[in-house]
Amino acid sequence: MAYSDKVIEHYENPRNVGTLDKNDPNVGTGLVGAPACGDVMRLQLRITEEGIIEDAKFKTFGCGSAIASSSLVTEWVKGKTVDQAMTLSNKDVARELALPPVKIHCSVLAEDAIKAAIADFKKKREARQGKQSAS
Amino acid sequence: MKLPIYMDNHATTPLDPRVLEAMLPYLREDFGNAASRNHAFGWKAEAAVEKARKQVAELIGASDKEIVFTSGATESDNLALKGVLEYYKEKGDHIITLKTEHKAILDTCKRLERIRQERLDELKLLRLSQLAEREVSQGELAELAIKHRLDEDATYQRWAALPTGGARVTYLDVEKDGRVSLEKLAAAITDKTVLVSIMFANNEIGTVQPIAEIGKLCRERGVLFHCDAVQGIGKLPFHVEELKVDLVSISAHKMYGPKGVGALYVRRKPRVRLAPIIDGGGHERGMRSGTLNVASIVGFGEAAELAREEMADESARLLRLREKLRAGIASQLDMVTVNGSLEHRLPGNLNVSFAYVEGEALMMSIKDVAVSSGSACTSASLEPSYVLRACGVEEDMAHSSIRFGLGRFNTEEEVDYVVRLVVDKVRKLRDMSPLYEMAKEGIDLKSIEWTAH
């Protein structure tokens, strides 16, 4: 199967590969997919008190399209608010990277990773606020 | 050294220039039909085909009268299975094969099973219509079969025992090293078994089966033995008398010959009979009609002769290169597993899983090297390799597998280049892999609840 130029470009020069401290209270971590299915995506977002995504890092086990999808969404969400990031859809990713039908699930995974990372961040924040109000 | 490098010699091999030379006259001035008996054009073509037939026969220790030319090994496999089943239908309809066989065998078997099932369903409907004294539809079949005790109905049983045109098939598991267990094979043979079909060497993992032992067992039990020998012939010695095989599928393009031509060896002593699957002018002693593909057959013959002459040296060289590739990778990377038996293996085959790196991604990053992967992402079905799964390889490791197929034209310089490239790219991809990071931290990946999708 031939890859689109954008997939190849992201695959060869992936943006924002790396790890943020998952114990940092401002970092949300999303881990989606499964090794048995051949793709696992880990997306980490550092979010300010104002709800702005100031940093994004990813690591992905998966095919070229999965790596390109992860790389693309880290670029997209940086500087966005949490609410803006939540509206990002897999269709945007698939369109931007011109993914063929068999690779659509890679873009779904990228959307899921954003949602999972934000959910993790919100859970942490609620836990912290809960603790503050208790004390 | 030229890029890209071809290291996918199980998929196909380049045409040897000497083979092309031998073919060229038959694509130009010597264009005759080998079946034209009355002029020089036909005689010349016939002589060329008969020479090639001897060359192919000699490679496997057969007589030239035992070679039937086909369009390739897929056709040979179809002819062996369907042809034997039809000819020996009065004897039985049971076939035994392996879960790791090529799709040309497995899908043929599935069709034969489906034909039998459809025939039995028709018979059931017919009998139930008689018993119920009305038209019966397919939807009622299960319910009425119980009501009328079809299992115990003597008439239905008599009908069902007649040849159906299809087959019952046993798909044997393989051991972890990819080899068949002879005990399991012996236990699977019944008085209805007509054919055992087991490959010489596997196309993905290069595992070589114990053909001589299987041949001996089949001969003792009075069962025909077909061997899809596409991947092994020309690489390892294969002698039909020593191995006691009855039918052998061979392909030209896996041994530096042209595509679109193959052969089926059909034993004459003791005689093995076949019903043809292609009807027509009665070529190839009635077993395969159709005007012979003279130029390609000539190329096939030349390729067979070259393989016979050069096999020993070439295999020794390929084994040395393969071991260099394996050692080069294994000494520089951790968590690399070889799939399939190392001992019983084609010299040019290396199938390895690089844990925590997805196969298609790795192929993409070594795009100047042509290899293949058992990763689902490379298949239309989105399932990882059924061969690796049958050998007990976990799904994630099947996704991480790469098959290197070394061949006649690979050089040591290419192997050195591929080792450096693969090591570098696997390291890069592992730096990008959350699984590798977690494994390095000592997290048991099996303890995590993954969100399968």
Image (spheres, coloured by chain):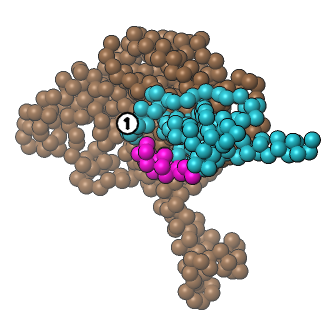
Chain colours: A cyan, B brown
For image coordinates 52% across by 60% down, the residue present is: B114
Image quarter hosting the C terminus of chain A: top right
Is A88 magenta? The answer is: yes
Provide residue B9's location: percent of width, then percent of height: 40, 27
Instruction: Give the residues drawn in magenta, as a range.
Output: A87-104
Q: Is residue B240 above or below residue B184?
A: above
Image quarter hosting the N terminus of chain A: top left
Predominant SS of the magenta segment? helix
Side of B315 relative to B174 (left or right): left
Provide residue B391's location: percent of width, then percent of height: 63, 35
Is B348 magenta? The answer is: no
Q: Foreground: B416 or B52?
A: B416
The quarter of the picture where residue B230 lies is top left
Viewer can see residue B235: no
Q: Is residue B67 above or below residue B302?
A: below
Q: Is residue A94 above or below residue B30?
A: below
Q: Secondary structure at mark 1?
A: helix
Side of B35 relative to B377 (left or right): left
Residue sitting farthest toward the right: A135
- Amino acid, disc 1: Asp
Q: Foreground: B160 or A51?
A: A51
Provide residue B277's location: percent of width, then percent of height: 36, 53
Q: Which residue is mark 1?
A: A5
Provide residue B350's location: percent of width, then percent of height: 52, 23
Residue sitting farthest toward the front: A50
For image coordinates 63% across by 46% down, the residue present is: A82
Q: Foreground: A29 or A130?
A: A130
For image coordinates 13% across by 44% down, the residue present is: B36
For image coordinates 37% across by 36% down, the residue present is: A5
Side of B309 relative to B81 (left or right): left
Please state the chain letter of the residue tagged with numbered disc 1 in the rendered image.
A
Viewer can see residue B423: yes
